[in-house]
Image (cartoon, coloured by chain):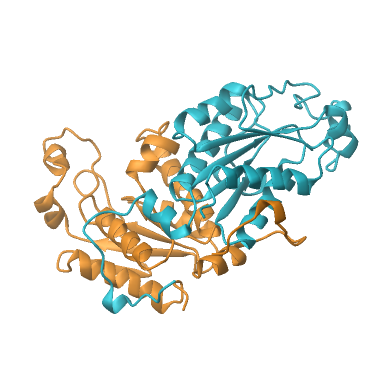
Chain colours: A orange, B cyan
Amino acid sequence: MTKLKSTNITWHASEVGRADREKLLGQKGATVWLTGLSGSGKSTIAVAAEQALIQNGRMAYVLDGDNIRHGLNSNLGFSPEDRTENIRRIGEVAKLFTDAGIIVFSSFISPYRADRDAVREIMGPGDFIEVHVEATVETCEGRDVKGLYKKARAGEIPEFTGISAPYEAPEKPELVVDTNSQSVEESVAAVVSYLESKGYLGS
Amino acid sequence: MTKLKSTNITWHASEVGRADREKLLGQKGATVWLTGLSGSGKSTIAVAAEQALIQNGRMAYVLDGDNIRHGLNSNLGFSPEDRTENIRRIGEVAKLFTDAGIIVFSSFISPYRADRDAVREIMGPGDFIEVHVEATVETCEGRDVKGLYKKARAGEIPEFTGISAPYEAPEKPELVVDTNSQSVEESVAAVVSYLESKGYLGS
């Protein structure tokens, strides 16, 4: 990148747009929307994929519970309306990052097909990559890293996806990674390979 | 940037963080929060500054009415509560972009000091750069590019900032640009010069 001299900045009359940002970054912006049960491996895959991209000179960013639930969506609860609004806002933010030219990973259970489809709807063609991170309830419950399944079985968490609330699997996801059998490395390789083969990562 | 081979991706065990993204981009993330009356020149300056940065190899993005009011904040009106929520959400999104390592320009009237200070409050030290885009009501009304002042004077727009609703100027902004007398070029140069002198644009 060239050194910028504010004393001698110049710009053309036209506004820059998404294409200019993508050219600068050498990639295409996209939303990689990971959906799956709690414990399926969404965040692990998202974080590892972000890392793989950044270590290879691509710009990526992860939206997850850590930076969304305590920030933008801190005023939302868990009512049906609030769950829908939660996903809607995440989708709108992902759209902004995509427009900025960034490959943004969204890591939320997002159990309802209608909510995910509404996000797909606001995105441009090719901008929304739905990845079903598939794992059976048994697999996820066997991991139970956060102890949430145990609490859900004990009735301490109402409406827990896969136990006491439905998970609606994607019907036509762009990609499926099966973490019942695949390692994190294999899942990440599948995601990165998809991005590469479809031209998101430039040349 | 190096070519990424998905068949041979590697990454270290640690997560990437803001510092890694900033290193990749060769800059520091920041929120440049432009505040001022309608017609003061906020969006013109934001778009031109974005362009100047991108044409010089820096990653920048503009949040403005075009991409926020029709998207993320499309379910907000103009009640006092909704106006505050509008600015809160924009602040949270700007924080995400800042964390991503991007220089994000926020271009909204944001007339209330308390709302702007609440955004400053959620940001890390040095991440929030408040820029008062100063212009008198007379100057802005003289421009009246969108014909809004005329409508406001006719009583067709209630609670119009500067006419029938207050504008609370920043008390300690990081920067003031006076568009009563300064050209767009001079204002943009002042913003970019600030970013450069404070080390946001790398070396």
Relative to A187, residue A142 above or below: above
Q: Position of residue B23 (x, y in %)?
A: 42, 56
Q: Is A70 left, or right, of A85 in this rendering? A: left
User: From the viewer's perspective, is residue B112 above or below residue A8?
Assistant: above
From the viewer's side, name the closer residue of A188 and B23: B23
Q: Residue at x 28, y 72 (%)?
A: B9
Viewer-side residue, A149 vs A71: A71
- Asked whether the viewer can see residue B110, the reply is yes
Q: Quadrant of the N terminus of chain A?
A: bottom right
The one nearer the camera, B86 or B34, is: B34
Q: In the displayed structure, does residue A80 sit left or right of residue B45?
A: left
Q: Residue at x 32, y 65 (%)?
A: A52
Residue B165, given in percent of the width and then of the height, sits at 74, 21
- Where on the picture, by quarter, is residue B36? top right
Residue A161 image position (x, y, % from top left)? 25, 47
Q: Is residue A36 visible?
A: no
Q: Nearer the viewer, residue A16 or A82?
A: A16
Vertical order, B72 against A74 (above or below): below
The quarter holding residue A50 reads bottom left
**Residue displayed at 86% across by 33% down:** B139
Residue A74 horizontal/vertical position (percent)? 40, 33
The quarter holding residue A15 reads bottom right
Seen in the image, is B109 located left or right of residue A150? right
What is the count of numbered marks?
Answer: 0
